[in-house]
Structures are given as C-alpha cells and as structure tokens.
Amino acid sequence: MLYVGLIHWPCLDKNGNEIATAITNMDLHDCARVCLTYGVDTLYIVHPYQAQLDFAEKIMDHWLKGFGGDYNPLRKQAFEVIRLVRDIEEIKRQTGARMIGTTAARLDKSISWADARDQVQSGDVCLLFGTGWGIAPRVLETLDEVIEPIEGPGDFNHLSVRSAVSIAIDRIVGR
C-alpha cells in the first residue's frame, strides 16, 4: 500500500534554515486529487501547529461536510483521502510503512525510482515530500530510504511540491 506525507516541519527555507511552512489550499486540493487518481491510500498533512491544522480542517470541512461537497462531489471524494497529523512518527504508528523521503538534492545513498516501485509492490511505503525548500536533512537521515531527485535536462531543480508529488507517484505506480 502507498501512503503520501506532505511535510511542513521541519523544512528548509531558501537560506537553509529550519522552518515550519504554511499549509496551502492548493496543496490540499491538488495533492488529494493526485492521490485519489493513483490509488494512494492516505495523504497525510504533517504540521506541528494547531492553528495550521485548524486551517486545513476548515478547508476540508467545506468540501467534506459543507456546500463544497454538494457542489463538487469529485472534490469531496478526493478530500476523503486526507488525514491531519502532527509529526512523521504518527504516520509510522498508523501505517507501519517504510518511510521514503524525497529531495531535490543528490545524495550518495539514494535509491532509484525502480527500487521505490519494487518496495511499494512488496509492502507498505509512505513517500514523504517536503514543502518550502524541502525536508530538513536531519529528518532525511532518519528515514528508511531517500529516493533520487526528479531532474530535468537543465540545471534548474525547484519544483512545486504539487508537481513533485504528481511526477513521483506516476513514476512509482503509473502505467
């Protein structure tokens, strides 16, 4: 089974400082739709601050319980895959999955996309994506694996998290 975690803490800012990033409406909408399309079991939104989790809950309530769900049942269906948690440890407790991080940085010990695909086919995996400028290196070091970066032909490599989630999930479970 495949799970996805959208990490908002600890992430990096453009100067390499650890920060907590803000949950965005667009990330919830777009990542949930990708997860539903590709059969991801759960999209975990990870944030330590209650105010940010309350914000996400308010958006989710609009689509799951409010007018939004009546107006757009497909969006309601996508939002049903989202779960809010305070930390990565909560995902581990709920799923028991292998934790595979993503990063735009080239690391010595990263696994290939084919290796990640094999792991998903053989057991439960949670693919973790950092917001801002990515998951803090100290967190990447604690994960079971880190996957090689998504790279294009040029030197620029700073995708939106929504784009990275889409590309990565397609590479792992797409046809």
Image (tube, rainbow, N blue to C red):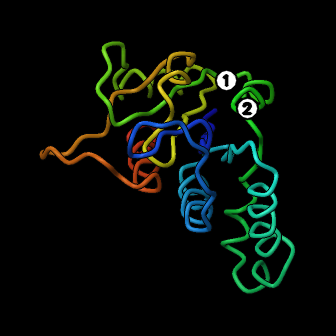
Question: Would you name the residue on which mark 2 appears?
Answer: 91
Q: Which residue is drawn at 73% across and 32% down?
A: 91
Residue 63 position, x and y percent, is 76, 73
Percent position of residue 1, x then y: 64, 32
Relative vertical location of residue 16 with respect to residue 37 in this rendering, above or below: above
Residue 50 rendering spot, x and y as whole percentages? 82, 51
- Local secondary structure at mark 2: helix
Q: Residue at x 78, y 31 (%)?
A: 90
Task: Single out the residue that lies furthest toward the left.
Answer: 154
Q: Residue 73 carries which label?
A: none
Q: Can residue 144 be seen from the camera position used here?
A: yes
Q: Which marked residue is nearer to the observer: mark 1 or mark 2? A: 2
Residue 97, disc: 1
How many labels were placed on the picture?
2
Dots 1, 2 in contact, CB < 8 A: yes
Q: How crowded is mark 1: few (under 14 residues within 10 Å), some or many (20 or more)?
A: some
Tag 1: amino acid? Ala
Residue at 61% across, 20% down: 98
For the C terminus, give its image quadrant. Answer: top left
